Image: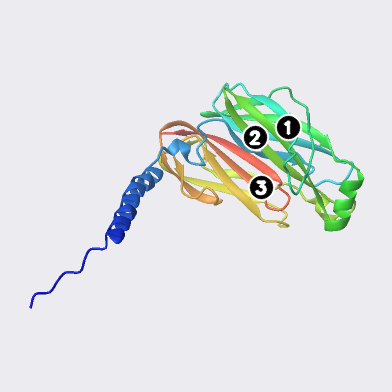
Amino acid sequence: MISKSKPINRTLVKEFKSRFKKIVCLIPLALAAACGDRSERPEVVAKMRALGVEQTPVNAKPGDTVNLTFYVAGNPATQMTPVVLLDTQARYSVPIAVTPIDSIPTETKIGALSLYSYRATFTVPTTANILALIAKQGFARMRYQVKFTASGDDENVVGDTVIYAVGASQLAWTAPEIGITAPTATSASGSVALEGSIVSSGLENNRVSWYVSAGTVKNRRAKSTVWETVPSGTQTVFMTVRGMKSGAFSIKSQAVTLD
């Protein structure tokens, strides 16, 4: 008995070929993402990079003067131009334009990189809308923005200050005290331990971030981690810690000579 083969469903074949082609095309993209240029990794400072904003006081009340220090990392001798902006697109914060204290950022060279600091200030308004927000939800947020420009590269730094009523317990909150306990000024290249210390009031959780001049960080969000594939020579490590509720910010840096 001769069996007749079923006719080929050309629509299914066409669909299979199309899907197979897409899978084949996606594989090189996935490999490229996994094996891409390490300078594009989030922890590697290959160009101008905003690290955070230190604010005093951490939380404020209507009428307080808030002092801000913006921190940007980058290559040495980068000529940065700061521009104060008003973030009118803020949905849950009241935008405010800060008043510059510095005309240009101050550069501090640390190993292979430099840390740039820029100071500004603002006074919390005592207007009816701010007081109404505090009465309604217990707090208000003031949003500020400064854009740093260097050689066609822009870095926008946006932050919030949380405003509470007079007498609120949150007004006593302070930024965490932090330190880099490892590595020290000299270390062996290859794989290096990163260890940070954090002394906090314990009133909020803190978020850790590591930044380096080269190599890779195994877990850039961990207080204790490993700095891998570090080349020899002079390198730089930054550790930042940010309060998850208040945004309280602290930063430490370390220049490291790797053998």
Looking at the rendered structure, the secondary structure element under dot 1 is: strand
Q: How many marks?
A: 3
The residue located at (46%, 36%) in the rendering is 39
Q: Nearer the viewer, residue 19 or 111?
A: 19
Looking at the rendered structure, the secondary structure element under dot 3 is: strand
Image position, residue 89 (x, y; %): 72, 41
Image quadrant containing the C terminus: top left
The residue located at (69%, 48%) in the rendering is 176
Distance from the alpha carbon under mark 3 to that under mark 1: 23 Å
Looking at the rendered structure, the secondary structure element under dot 2 is: strand
Looking at the rendered structure, the kind of residue marked 1 is Leu
Is residue 30 visible to us here? Answer: yes
Distance from the alpha carbon under mark 1 to that under mark 2: 9 Å
36 displayed left or right of 6: right
114 displayed left or right of 24: right
Is residue 187 visible to us here? Answer: no
107 displayed left or right of 166: left
Q: Name the residue beneath numbered marker 1.
A: 85
The picture quadrant where one finds residue 105 is: top right
The residue located at (73%, 32%) in the rendering is 85
The picture quadrant where one finds residue 48 is: top right
Q: Name the residue beneath numbered marker 3.
A: 242
